């Protein structure tokens, strides 16, 4: 059911993941497809479905990302960023 | 919530990491906890008793937590504290700039129904960003008093103290929390938090590009970032010597004065053993270590600036990709940097790493970081045995070896400590330390260094004096003395790496604390700081000296570090590994270096 919904949303708005964002772009979080503990920690940093995020900076194509959620900045690796689904 | 019997009032400081709890704690109690612009610096509970109004109140600084319901070690610790220990009042510290996302924690805490007071810290930064607070409205909707302060600059602290005194005047008991109360639904709190923020906080529509963003554009540049980091570290060490060495000369001069015009005339008629004990044991041994205090002080102050500035998170960001190839992440590298001061806080700082195996791997490599105690010995030997134009290069090469050995160890052991740790690290804005905080930091670190090491140094140096001088009728450190006999036993181990067997006695004591090595050498050769250098130059050639320095750099961590490793890892097996592995490596590296150099020399 959840899968279906995601596919459906995929068709309507072009879904991408956080690691595909280019610096200075802003996007809205759609879903977070990561282990529970990591989801909890992201939530504490202000990252959850519906929230706006922007990519501040990244080091190369596979390097870590600096992300801004509200007035909080944090860094994470591209691998984890690939688990955060967003729409521009 | 359960009441407990009448007890002394206790206020617990709670809040997210890097909100300035420790800074506020220090401001209110005068007790300085280690703080830095890096999440998770407080890893030990610190408590202090102060007088508030007419009462003596105990204040406890708890480590930062993101959520009462989290699974990290710090979160468990805070939960355990609230369940097992009782508190009279929770002082909840928030970073005012991030109130939006920190409020859910306040609501979680509020649901515990403990008396509480909310402090919005970093009011200065919020004002700079154009964020305005209606504290009266926030207090009303939250149902608890709200206070706006800047702990760093000291704004609003007098009022806060008054309010705390009022709050505790009416509280006479402590409360503890039931486990069930600690686990309530979060979604409802989330919505409530949003409602409160929108009513009481006025955010500007778009956050303007800050100073931090502008600095980051340079410091985080993909190509320039790392070279700038290396340059900054280089400048830091230049500054340490530039400022520290003149101060050190002053210290030497004072010690000489004490010796020549104070002690020597006083001891003219006393027994030779007492005279040797005071002059060669106390003054030569302990004095030689003391002359390094200024360098240590300057080093800790400058390291404090780096830690407070927020730059270390950026360093973690820059090196993360390289470190991931070693089975670690950027944070482990930052701990290596912190370890340049002292390995012990760096070892404790690995608590921010959540996966046990990765944390152990980080703890295995931190002791290779060239700490300030080893630095003393290395600076001394370098100055004594190498011409000035080579000295800087020699120092640099030893730092390089320190990092190389650490990385090599990680590469070798990463398969045994495999993990799938993720990196998720908050990026604080740059903060520039105030003069007051700098001086406090320097004073605090130096005092800690002295308190921690003075017992070891004194005891170790005196024991070495006894070993090298007993029996008293023989010449000091000659083959017949205790030290001479011990040296004979150690000879087969140290001869292949070119270390004079009598010097190996100093190494033996260096296991207790590396600070003893230099004092021990002074006692062994019966020469104070001024003469020791020249004397060493006649006894050792540069190959032997470098081999000795390599050995000092790599071999077994000091006793406090080993105790910390044991406490943090909770495993004797791992502790044994962290003692044996460096020892083995030190011998091997020195052996390869010494034999190759001798072979090249023909």
Image (cartoon, coloured by chain):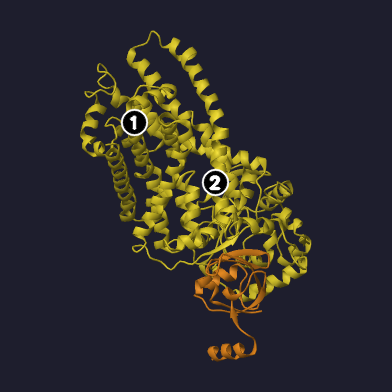
Chain colours: A orange, B yellow
**Which chain does the residue under circle 2 lie in?**
B
Estimate the x, y position of residue B116 in percent, counting from the top left. 65, 59
**Residue corresponding to mark 2:** B233
Q: Name the mark nearer the viewer: 2 or 1.
A: 1
Q: Is B256 rendered above or below residue B35?
A: above
Looking at the image, residue B559 sits to the left or right of residue B475; the answer is right
Q: Which mark is residue B500?
A: none
Q: From the viewer's side, name the closer residue of B256 and B458.
A: B256
Looking at the rendered image, the quarter that the N terminus of chain B falls into is bottom right
Q: From the viewer's side, name the closer residue of B119 and B593.
A: B593
**Which chain does the residue under circle 1 lie in?**
B
| Residue under the image location 45 percent in, 66 percent down | B421
Q: Is B545 rendered above or below residue A27?
A: above
Q: Earlier in the sequence, mark 2 or mark 1?
A: 2
Looking at the image, residue B540 sits to the left or right of residue B290; the answer is left
Q: From the viewer's side, name the closer residue of B571 and B285.
A: B285
Judging from the image, what secondary structure is the residue with disc 1 in?
loop
Estimate the x, y position of residue B541 in percent, counting from the top left. 34, 31
Estimate the x, y position of residue A30 in percent, counting from the top left. 61, 80
**Residue corresponding to mark 1:** B541
């Amino acid at each position: 059911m959840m899968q279906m919904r995601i596919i459906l949303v995929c068709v309507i708005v072009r879904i991408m993941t956080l690691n595909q964002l280019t610096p200075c772009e802003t996007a809205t979080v759609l879903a977070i497809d990561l282990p529970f503990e990591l989801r909890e920690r992201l939530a504490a940093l202000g990252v959850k479905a519906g929230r706006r995020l922007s990519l501040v900076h990244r080091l190369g194509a596979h390097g870590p990302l600096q992300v801004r959620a509200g007035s909080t900045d944090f860094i994470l690796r591209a691998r984890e960023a690939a688990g955060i689904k967003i729409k521009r | 919530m359960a009441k407990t019997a009448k007890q002394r009032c206790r206020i617990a400081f709670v809040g997210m990491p890097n909100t300035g709890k420790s800074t506020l704690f220090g401001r209110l109690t005068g007790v300085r906890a280690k703080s830095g612009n890096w999440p998770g610096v407080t890893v030990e509970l610190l408590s202090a008793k102060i007088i508030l109004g007419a009462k003596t109140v105990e204040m406890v600084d708890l480590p930062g937590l993101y959520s009462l319901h989290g699974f990290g070690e710090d979160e468990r610790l805070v939960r355990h504290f609230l369940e097992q220990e009782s508190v009279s009042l929770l002082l909840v510290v928030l970073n005012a700039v991030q109130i939006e996302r920190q409020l859910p924690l306040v609501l979680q805490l509020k649901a515990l129904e403990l008396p509480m007071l909310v402090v919005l810290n970093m009011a200065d930064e919020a004002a700079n960003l154009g964020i305005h607070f209606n504290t009266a409205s926030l207090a009303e909707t939250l149902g608890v008093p709200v206070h706006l302060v800047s702990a760093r600059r000291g704004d609003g602290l007098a009022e806060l103290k008054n309010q705390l005194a009022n709050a505790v005047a009416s509280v006479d008991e402590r409360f503890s929390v039931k486990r069930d109360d600690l686990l309530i639904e979060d979604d409802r709190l989330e919505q409530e938090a949003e409602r409160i923020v929108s009513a009481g906080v006025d955010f500007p529509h778009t956050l303007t590009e800050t100073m931090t963003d502008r600095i980051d554009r340079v410091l985080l540049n993909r190509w320039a970032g790392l070279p700038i980091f290396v340059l900054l570290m280089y400048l830091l060490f230049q500054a340490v010597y530039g400022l520290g060495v003149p101060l050190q000369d002053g210290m030497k001069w004072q010690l000489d004065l004490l010796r020549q015009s104070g002690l020597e005339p006083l001891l003219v008629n006393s027994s030779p053993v007492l005279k040797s004990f005071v002059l060669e044991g106390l003054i030569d041994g302990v004095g030689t270590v003391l002359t390094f205090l200024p360098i240590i002080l300057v080093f800790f102050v400058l390291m404090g600036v780096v830690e407070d500035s927020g730059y270390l998170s950026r360093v973690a960001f820059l090196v993360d990709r390289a470190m991931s190839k070693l089975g670690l992440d950027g944070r482990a590298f930052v701990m290596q940097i912190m370890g340049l001061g002292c390995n012990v806080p760096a070892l404790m700082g690995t608590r921010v790493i959540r996966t046990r195996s990765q944390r152990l791997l980080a703890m295995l490599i931190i002791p290779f970081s060239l700490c300030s105690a080893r630095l003393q010995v290395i600076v001394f030997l370098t100055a004594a045995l190498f011409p000035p134009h080579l000295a800087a290069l020699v120092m640099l090469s030893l730092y390089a070896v320190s990092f190389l050995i650490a990385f090599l160890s990680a590469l070798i052991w990463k398969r045994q400590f495999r993990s799938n740790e993720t990196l998720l690290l908050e990026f604080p804005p740059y903060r520039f330390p105030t003069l007051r905080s700098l001086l406090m930091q320097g004073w605090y670190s130096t005092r800690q260094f002295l308190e921690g090491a003075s017992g070891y140094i004194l005891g170790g140096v005196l024991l070495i004096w006894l070993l090298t001088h007993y029996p008293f009728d023989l010449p000091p450190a000659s083959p017949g003395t205790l030290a001479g006999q011990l040296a004979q036993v150690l000879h087969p181990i140290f001869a292949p790496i070119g270390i004079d067997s009598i010097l190996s006695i100093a190494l033996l004591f260096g296991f207790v604390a590396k600070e003893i090595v230099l004092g021990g050498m002074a006692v062994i050769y019966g020469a104070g700081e001024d003469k020791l250098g020249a004397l060493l130059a006649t006894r050792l050639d540069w190959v032997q000296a470098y081999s000795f320095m390599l050995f000092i750099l790599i071999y077994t961590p000091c006793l406090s570090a080993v105790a910390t490793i044991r406490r943090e890892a909770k495993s004797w097996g791992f502790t044994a590994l962290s003692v044996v592995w460096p020892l083995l490596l030190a011998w091997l590296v020195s052996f390869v270096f010494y034999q190759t150099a001798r072979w090249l020399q023909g």
